[in-house]
């Protein structure tokens, strides 16, 4: 605001100086024109006259009133010397009254002219005058002068008006600018207040929700300051979404650790129990009974060890896939892969009805054959595990645009909508309609999703009772940077 007022003040000062100079110049020109007229009239009528006749100015001007208070007249001739008068200087009415100029005043006029026709001179007791010297054919020099007091008074009045108007204008400008800025920056104050309240919230731990927002009235996108408020609201929405995602990830991680611990605790407890049982049997018994008991315990230890090994391998695979590792790319025929996967799955559930629908020509993608085979195996195992005997399972491969699509469809009971969003989470469990029967770790779909995304594809699911389909979309052309 100070800069605005200073800039406007400078403009007003420049305008005042230019106006005063222009008006002063105009008034000076008018005074000079008027002075020329008086000088010409007086000089024309002075022919043959002498200096003592100055007192009879009415006679000199043919009996006419001079018309200007303070008219100065000085005459110089070789015979009569120099004399001068000033008329009606202190009269409101022009009546021919005059004062005789002193020798000092005449000297000041002479020094100012100094051989020039026109001059501006300040005369003692009279003030500033504009004078002009003219000569008659008889050698008489007539000096005519008019006072500049009116010009100075008008300029002084003008400057006073300009100063007062400028001060008033600046005060009004300061008030209106302050009000305008205050109103215009109100959205920024709302933004600052909102940002301060958000900054005082603990955002580093626990469940966090940012409810603070810049009021809609202060976030009008049609104004610059409103755009700032709208941008902050958008940022807070994004931060709030990110914090919610962070909280969900933390909860998933805690659940993941709990599930992993639970999955590992069971085989470890079994291994420990059977180990103790074997040692007790060896220490207390001898003969075939001890050998048989020890053999059974060792078999159980081996089974639980294999289960724990599979779990650890699955976790390690997920970790490596998250890091972008573990994939070896080559040319893969999805149609052939589907045929092999169905052939492997059919003997594991002969009570199901298995179908396959693949094109005659190869459907080639760039990927890791082993990992894509694992995706097919996991999806078929998921369909087999969570559907009752007699369910029809269909595996199909098609080309759709620039993608290859592999689908696993079944007409089983479907997926509970409550668990569909978390279906691909690690250690996910289905509801009772898809009860777990095989003792799996709950990592199959999570591994399939990680592998597909590692191939720059996506996996989707749609499910209603009697119609469940898992779809794997893979790009037909290699993805740059893969």
Image: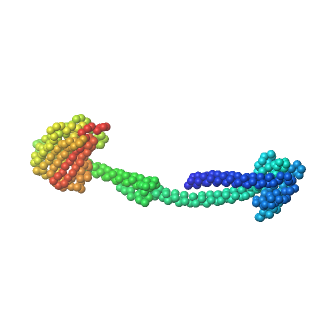
Q: Residue 316, can we see it?
A: no
Which quadrant of the figure contains the N terminus? Answer: bottom right
How far across and down, in percent of the image, does residue 68 sit? 76, 59
Q: In the rendered view, would you say 223 is above or below 277? A: below
Residue sitting at x 60%, y 52%:
11
Residue 147: quadrant of the picture: bottom right
Can you give x and y, in whole percent of width and height, for residue 192 in the image? 46, 56
Work out which residue is located at the far top of the displayed protein and give it: 330
Q: How many marks?
A: 0
On screen, residue 8 versus residue 69, left or right, reads: left
Which residue: 72% across, 53% down?
Answer: 33
Splitting the image into 4 quarters, where does residue 377 fall?
A: top left
- Look at the image and tell me in which quarter the C terminus lies: top left
**Residue at image point 70% right, 52% down:** 29
* Camera-nearest residue between 210 and 137: 137
Find the residue positioned furthest to the bottom: 93
Closest to the observer: 3 or 214?
3
Nearer to us in this view, 97 or 378: 97
Instruction: Tell which of 183 and 76 is nearer to you.
Output: 76
Q: Position of residue 94 (x, y in %)?
A: 78, 63
In the rendering, at what x and y percent does residue 35 appear? 75, 53
**Res. 94 visible in picture:** yes
The colour scheme applied to this rendered structure is: rainbow
Q: Residue at x 21, y 46 (%)?
A: 471
């Amino acid at each position: 605001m100070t800069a605005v007022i200073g800039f406007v003040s400078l403009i007003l000062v420049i305008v005042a100086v230019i106006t005063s100079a222009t008006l002063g110049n105009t008034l000076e020109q008018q005074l000079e024109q008027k002075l020329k007229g008086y000088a010409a009239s007086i000089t024309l009528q002075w022919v043959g006259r002498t200096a003592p006749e100055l007192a009879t100015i009415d006679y000199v001007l043919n009996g006419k009133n001079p018309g200007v208070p303070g008219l100065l007249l000085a005459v110089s001739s070789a015979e009569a010397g120099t004399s001068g008068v000033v008329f009606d200087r202190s009269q409101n009415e022009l009546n021919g009254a005059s004062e005789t100029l002193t020798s000092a005043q005449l000297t000041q006029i002479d020094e100012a002219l100094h051989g020039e026709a026109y001059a501006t001179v300040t005369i003692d007791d009279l003030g500033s005058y504009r004078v002009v010297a003219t000569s008659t054919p008889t050698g008489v020099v007539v000096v005519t002068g008019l006072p500049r007091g009116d010009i100075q008074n008008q300029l002084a009045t003008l400057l006073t008006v300009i100063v007062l108007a400028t001060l008033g204008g600046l005060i009004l400008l300061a008030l209106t600018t302050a009000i305008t800025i205050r109103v215009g920056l109100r959205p920024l104050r709302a933004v600052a207040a909102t940002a301060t309240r958000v900054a005082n919230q603990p955002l580093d731990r626990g469940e966090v929700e940012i409810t603070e927002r810049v009021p809609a009235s202060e976030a009008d996108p049609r104004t610059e300051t409103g755009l700032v408020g709208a941008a902050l609201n958008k940022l807070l929405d994004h931060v709030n979404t990110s914090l919610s995602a962070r909280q969900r990830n933390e909860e998933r991680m805690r659940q993941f650790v709990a599930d992993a611990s639970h999955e590992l605790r069971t085989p470890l407890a079994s291994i420990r129990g059977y180990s103790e049982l074997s040692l007790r049997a060896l220490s207390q018994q001898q003969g075939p009974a001890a050998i048989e008991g020890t053999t059974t315990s060792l078999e159980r230890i081996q089974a639980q060890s294999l289960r724990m090994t599979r779990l650890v391998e699955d976790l390690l695979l997920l970790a490596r896939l998250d890091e972008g590792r573990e994939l070896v790319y080559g040319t893969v025929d999805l149609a052939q892969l589907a045929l092999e996967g169905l052939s492997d799955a059919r003997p594991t559930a002969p009570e199901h009805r298995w179908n396959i629908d693949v094109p005659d020509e190869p459907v080639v993608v760039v990927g890791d054959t082993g990992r894509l085979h694992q995706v097919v195996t996991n999806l078929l195992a998921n369909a087999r595990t969570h559907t009752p005997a007699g369910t029809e399972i269909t595996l199909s491969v098609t080309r759709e645009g620039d993608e290859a699509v592999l689908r696993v469809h079944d007409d089983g009971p479907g997926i509970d909508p409550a668990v569909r969003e978390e279906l691909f989470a690690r250690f996910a469990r289905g509801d009772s309609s898809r009860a777990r029967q095989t003792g799996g770790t709950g990592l199959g779909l999570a591994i399939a999703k990680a592998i597909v995304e590692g191939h720059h594809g996506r996996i989707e699911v749609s499910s209603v009772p009697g119609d469940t389909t898992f779809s794997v979309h893979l790009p037909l052309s290699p993805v740059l940077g893969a």
